Every structure is written in structure tokens, then in C-alpha cells.
Image (spheres, rainbow, N blue to C red):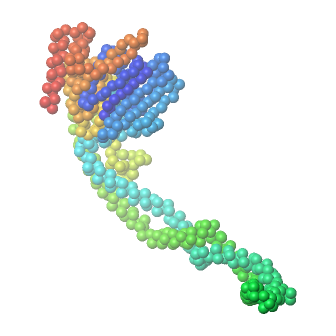
Amino acid sequence: MISRLSVRNYALIDEIEIEFGRGFTVLTGETGAGKSIIIDALSLVLGDRAYSNMIREGFDFAHVEATFINDGDEIVVKREVARDGRNRIFINGERSTVKALREKISNLVDIHGQHEHQRLLNPSSHLEFLDSFAGLKDMVKIYRDKYREFRAVKNRIETIIEDEAERERRKDLLEFQIEEIERAELKDGEDETLEDERTFLRSGEKIAQLAKEVKSLLSEEGGLEDNIGRLNAIMEEMSRLDATVSETSSQSTEALYILKDIEGFINEYIASLDFNPQRLEEVEGRLAQISLLKRKYGGTIEDILTYLSKAKEELYNLETYSETRENLEEKLKTLQDELKRIAFDISKSRKEAAKILEEQVEGELKELGMDGVEFVVSIEYNEGDDAVIDDTGVGFTSSGVDKVSFLISTNPGESPKPMVMVASGGELARVMLALRSILADADETPTLIFDEVDVGLGGRSASQVATRLRRLGGMRQVITISHLPQIAAYSHNHLKVEKKMKGGRAITTVKKISKMEKVGEIARMLSGEESVSKEAMENARRMIENAVSSDKGQ
């Protein structure tokens, strides 16, 4: 429901804030007071096109903000219109678009009497209304579940047909990749070991030269070993002559032993050196092979082996694919037979319900002062791109085999036409009211706004419209503009719209009036003058009492 509407600098409105209640709310006021401007402002926050010429003269921006309550959650919509044509939309404080706004609000409010926001003027919604009226929702749900399964199987078959060649190509590629990786017989960490070996092999000649230099320094005549030997002999002689030298003499002896150990290691090291150019070539080739695999399958040997595992799994799935095209086509045929049976059962029920709905709508319209109106529920078989056409030429969609549209003729002798082509706003609003009354349980739109619903009405017809508006208000929020006291008297909430002067300029004001003020306003509407008689006041009280008492009879 709409709980609040705030408008600034829009047409005749300087600044107003309206609190809307539950039930049936009526807006009344003198002609030209600005009642329709309020509906226009509401249309803006429902996603209507914004026009800069609606900005109040002397201002650069108009602001309209509305709060909607949906399942206990607040949705705050703000629309700003600029003089230069730019406009901004906010939903709960976040920038949005007209498209997103319409999607968010479309199921919350319907405005009737215009050609916007009217689900009943949209043929795509007529089928939904008819199914609800006929009590077919559960049966349609069963059909839709089957239809989804049918489409899934059909799409699977189409995918299989398209993918058979691709699947064979993929299998060939996977087999080649698996064979290439397995043939390499990779070992985790192998590349790092080979890198170290390559570094060593590339430096082999230099290492041998350095080792030989070490050997020469140690073992050649006059080398370190000879000199340390002579040093050691001298130190031993000195230690015999002076005991204080004995410790240092021992160190020279240790140095000699260390040099001999180094000499032994170097001799063994030189003997172990093997600078086979063929081995270097083998290492280079192996590393090149690993590098190629890394470029293809991953940056490390671990990545390559992981890819190998996944490739084997994918190849296994492709080779063991059990769901054949023949199996699926057999399943599709079974589903299609089930769909036909359910769809034609639904179609039969729809056609039976359509006749009843036609009679009830025409009866309602007669009560609303539209005698002679013909209302037709047209049901045809589906066709076109969206439908799955079977061998009989019948098209199946997610809703069955039927295409439903509501047609109406408001003048005797004229053939029924789509509802959107009904010219009179007042007639259109009453048709909608009749449908809403009959389909009240079928349509769950929480807020209905009727503009021009009382055009051309009077007497008993006006009372019938008033009764239905109040009855609808007992089930959801209903808002309407009215010039008729009969309709205003039946409202649960009454808003009075007035045009006043402020600073030499006309402004529109809106006030929620009390029960006593409501009596006075209805009396004014009865008499057509600001000064009302006691008789008019009494008639107004009686009308309000009749409205309240009508609740007991529902």
C-alpha cells in the first residue's frame, strides 16, 4: 500500500504531504483545485515519463517522494525533475532507473482511468486473471513444472546435436594431451634438480681448473704443505728450547694435518669430476621438454600433474556419457503426451469459466450504469516464436495452449475490441471496477487508484459504484477522485483538495478531514455551494450512515 506522498514545486503544488490509510480513500474538491495533479504526482513515482513543464513556475526542480509498504517492508521512491529535462530516481536512497522502478513497483499499484499501470489492459495478464477466476492455479502449476522439464529435455537434445562434433574434437585433444604428459614421466621437483645439475655442468671446466690450482698450492715443491712442514719442524725445535712456544708449535702441527686433509679431498674431488658434454645435452633437452609442458598446462610440474588428473576425469566423463539422444527423444515424447493431456484439460476449463466470467462482468456493468455492454473473453490457440509447435499445429507455452484476451463493446451494434481501445476514461474505469469486484480474490495488487470513475454517473449507478469501491477497500487500499457525494460518503478516509492563494499565487492544499468535516464536505457536494442548508447536512449524515451500515450486509 501507499503510506505517504510528499510533493514539492509540482504544478500548482507548493509543498504537500499526504498520509494515506488503509481501505477506501476519496479525494474531493472544486474543479481545478488540483486533484488530478496528485494522481499525476503518484504516476511519477510509479515510473511515468517526467515532463519539465510540470515544474512550478519560478523553481528549477520538482520533487515527488512516496513510501510504499510491501509485506511489512518500506520502499521509499524519490523522483527529482529538473527544468533542463534531467531527472533522477532513488529507491531506498540509491540511484535507480525508470525500468528498475517499474519492475519494483508494478505489482504494488494499478491506476485506472488512464492507459498506464493497468494490468487488466495488458493481454498478457488476462490469462492469469482467468485462471484465478476458474480456480486453475494448482493445475497450471503442475503443467508449468512439466513444461519446464519438457523444455529442459528438448534443450538437452538440441545441445547434444550441436555438441556431438565438438565432443569428439575435445576427446581427441584430451587424449593427445594426456599421452603427451604421461610420456614425459614427470617427477615433482625434477626441474629444480636439473637446473642445479645444468649449472654445475656448464661450470665444470672452471671448477676443474680451480681444483687443480688448489692441489698445486698444496702439493707442489715449495707449496703450502712444504712450507708448513718446514714451519712445523722449526716450531718443534723452538719448543724444545723454550717451553712457552710449545702451544703454538702444536697449532702448526694441526695446520699441517688440516692441509693434508684438504689435499686428500681435492684429490678425490678431481678424480670424481665427469664433464660429459653428452650429459649436459641430455639435461638441456629434458628441461626444454618440461618448459614446453609448463607453457601448455601450468607454471609448475605440480600444475601440470593437476591438469593431467582433470583431463583424465573429463575424458572419462566424455567416454562414459550414458544419456543418448535416443533416450532423451523417447523421454521428450512421453512428456509431450502428458503436456497435451494437461493443457487441453486446462483449456476446456478455461472456456467454461470464460462464459461465466462474461455473464458476471456484463451483470456488474449493468449495475454500474453501462447497460448493453458486451464483454468477451477471447480464447485462441497459441502460435508464434515463443510457442513449441507440435505436429497438430498447436503451440505450447509455459501457460498452456491458450492465448486469452478481454474484449469489450460499449455500444450496441459494435464488435468487441481489445480493452485498451476503449476510448472513454469513465467507461474504462467502470469496466475495471467491475472486473476488480469479480476478480478481487484473483488479483493481489494491494493498491488500486481509480481516476474518472464517476464520469457520467448519477443516482443508482453512482451508489452501485460507491458500494463496490467500499467493498474493495475492505480487501485492499483503494484511492479515487470523485465529484459525486454518493461515492465520497462511502469512503473510509476523506482527503479534501483545495486551491488557495499564497503570496499572490495559487497553490493546491490537501487535508484529511474529520468525520464532522466530512459531513460538511458531502453537504457542499450535494448542494453545489459553499453555504449549505440543514437539509443538505442531514442528507449527508444519512448517506454516511448508509455507507457504514452497508458493511454489515457484506
Q: Position of residue 206 (x, y in %)?
A: 79, 78
| Residue at the image position 43 percent from the left and 65 percent from the top | 325
- Quarter of the view holding residue 170: bottom right
- Quarter of the view holding residue 264: bottom right
Q: Is residue 496 visible?
A: yes
**342 or 65: which is nearer to us?**
65
The quarter of the image holding the N terminus is top left
User: From what the image shows, is residue 539 above or below residue 479?
Assistant: above
**160 or 495: which is nearer to us?**
495
Q: Is residue 232 visible?
A: no
The quarter of the image holding the C terminus is top left
Total labels drawn: 0
- Quarter of the view holding residue 54: top left
Q: Position of residue 508 (x, y in %)?
A: 37, 17
Direction from residue 223 to residue 496 in the image, left or right: left
Q: Position of residue 128 (x, y in %)?
A: 31, 42
User: From what the image shows, is residue 146 above or below residue 496?
Assistant: below
| Residue at the image position 45 percent from the left and 33 percent from the top | 89
| Residue at the image position 41 percent from the left and 67 percent from the top | 323
User: From what the image shows, is residue 470 above or below residue 295?
Assistant: above
| Residue at the image position 29 percent from the left and 36 percent from the top | 446
**167 or 389: which is nearer to us?**
167
User: From what the image shows, is residue 210 above or below residue 488?
Assistant: below
Direction from residue 269 to residue 170 in the image, left or right: left
